[in-house]
Amino acid sequence: MLVSLTVGKVDAGVAVLLTEDKRLIEFPSILLPPDISSGSIVDITVARNHASEAASAAAFATLQSTIYRTFGQKTPSAPVLRCRNATQTSVVLEWDPIDIATASLRGLTLYRNGSKAGTIPNPRDVHSTKLSGLAVDTEYVFHLVLRTSAGTYSSEKLAVRTHKMTELSGITITPGHMPTSLRESLQKTVERIGAKIVDTVRIDTTHFVCTEGRGQAWERAVENNIPVVVPDWVKGCEREGRIVGVRGYYLNADPRLRNVGPGVGMGQRSPQVPPQPSPTTQVTPPTPERASASSNRERGREDDRPPPPPPKFEKVAAEAPEPKSAAEEQKVRTEDLKPSNPSEEDEEESGESDEETGAEEKAAEAGLSTQGKQGGSETPEDDGASFHDVKL
C-alpha cells in the first residue's frame, strides 16, 4: 500500500506529515530522507510482515512452556514425620528431607499437642530432633508445619506414648573402652532386656557404657550430655526388671550408692554392702571418787552443823492480830469515847445491835470491860447512848 504525505514541519526528532484529507501525523524524522524540508512529499509503503509475526508467536509459546514446566507442574511437598525412638522421658523424631520445589523456604515448626514446641534450625540440613523432659507413660501428638512462598503445608499427626519404667526397649547403648569379655557379656545382656546397641554416638543414644573415660566417642557423649555409666548399670536394669537411676553407676561413683533390690531377670543376687553404722556420741559417766579420811572428816563437819532456819513467809490476812502495846490501846479507848455525830444517829438506830456487838468485840480484844452510863442505866429504847465513863 503506497501513501503520499506532505511534510509540514520538521523538528529535531519529530516531523509533522499531512495527509490528503488534512490529517496530521507525527512521524520520527530519523526515518525520513535527510534532504527533506517543509513542503516535501514523501511516499511511504505500508505492508504486513507475516514471517516476523509467526516467529514472535513461536518464541512466546516456548517461553510459556518453560515457565509452566519449571513452576507450574511441581509444588512443595508436606513433610513426613516419624518416631525414631522413645524412652520413659524422651522422644526422638525424624522426617524426610523437605521438598519445596521452586518455592522459597520460610520456616519449619514442630507442634506438640497443638502447641508450638519449637522451630527447627537449618531445616534443609537437620532431619531429626529430640524432646526431653516428658512424663512417663503419657501419650503426645506431634506434627510439623512447613511454610514456603508457595503456601503452608502440614504433616500428618503422629501419636507417641512414652514408655513405662518396666519397659527397657527404648534403651540405646553405645559401648566405649572396656575389656573384650565384658563387651561380649554386655551384648548378651542388652539382647536379653530388649534394648539396642549402636557403634557410634547418635541423637537417639541414651547411655554411653565404658570402663575408661577416653576416646572420641566418650568426648562426644560428654559433649551431648549423655550419661556415661559402667556395664553394671545394664545388669542392674536386668536384675530390677526396670530402668534404674544412673547416679550410683557413673565411672567415679561410689558403689554403695546403688540401690540393689530383689532380682527379677537373674537368679543370682549381687552381694550387698552392709550398711555402715551412723556415728553416735557416747557419754562416759564420771569415775566415782574414793573415800578418804579427809572426806570423812568433811562429812562429819557437815553433819555437826545446825539445820538451817525455816524460811520466813509473809503474813496472810487471815492470821490472828498481834497484841497491841499500851499506847495503841489508849488510842483505841480515846476513839471509842468520842460522841457520835447527830447525822449518824439515824444510822445507829437501824444498826444498834450491830454496833453494840462490834464494841464488845473491840473491848474484849483490848482487855477492857464496858460500863454503864453515869447517873442511870442503859435501856433498850435509848438508841443514841454512848459510853461516858470507861474503867479498866
Image: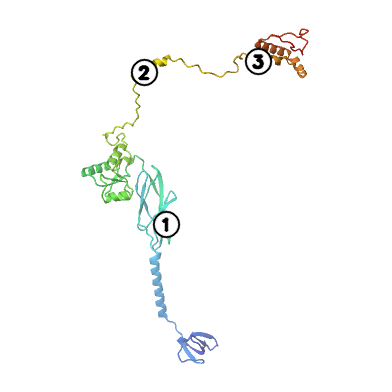
Mark 2: few/some/many CA within 10 Å (<14, 14-19, 20+) = few
Q: Position of residue 121 (x, y in %)?
A: 38, 56
Mark 3: few/some/many CA within 10 Å (<14, 14-19, 20+) = few
- Residue 228, disc: none
User: Of the residues shown, which amino acid type is indicated by label 2?
Assistant: Ser
Between 125 and 369, the residue placed more toward the observer is 369
* Gap between marks 1 and 2 measured at Cα: 105 Å
| Sequence-first tag of 3 and 2 | 2
Whether 271 is drawn above or below 321: the answer is below
Residue 66 seen: yes
User: Of the residues shown, which amino acid type is indicated by label 3?
Assistant: Ala
User: Of the residues shown, which amino acid type is indicated by label 1?
Assistant: Tyr
Between 291 and 254, the residue placed more toward the observer is 291
| Sequence-first tag of 1 and 3 | 1
- For the image shown, how many numbered marks are present on the structure? 3
In this rendering, the label closer to the viewer, 1 or 2:
2
Q: Going by the image, does 107 lie left or right of 14? A: left
Secondary structure at numbered mark 1? strand
* Gap between marks 3 and 2 measured at Cα: 58 Å
* Gap between marks 1 and 3 measured at Cα: 123 Å
Q: Which residue is mark 3?
A: 327
Q: Position of residue 364 (x, y in %)?
A: 66, 10
Q: Which residue shows up at 29% across the image and 50% down it?
A: 219
In this rendering, the label closer to the viewer, 3 or 2:
3
Secondary structure at numbered mark 3? helix
- Residue 295, disc: 2
Mark 1: few/some/many CA within 10 Å (<14, 14-19, 20+) = some
- Residue 153, disc: 1
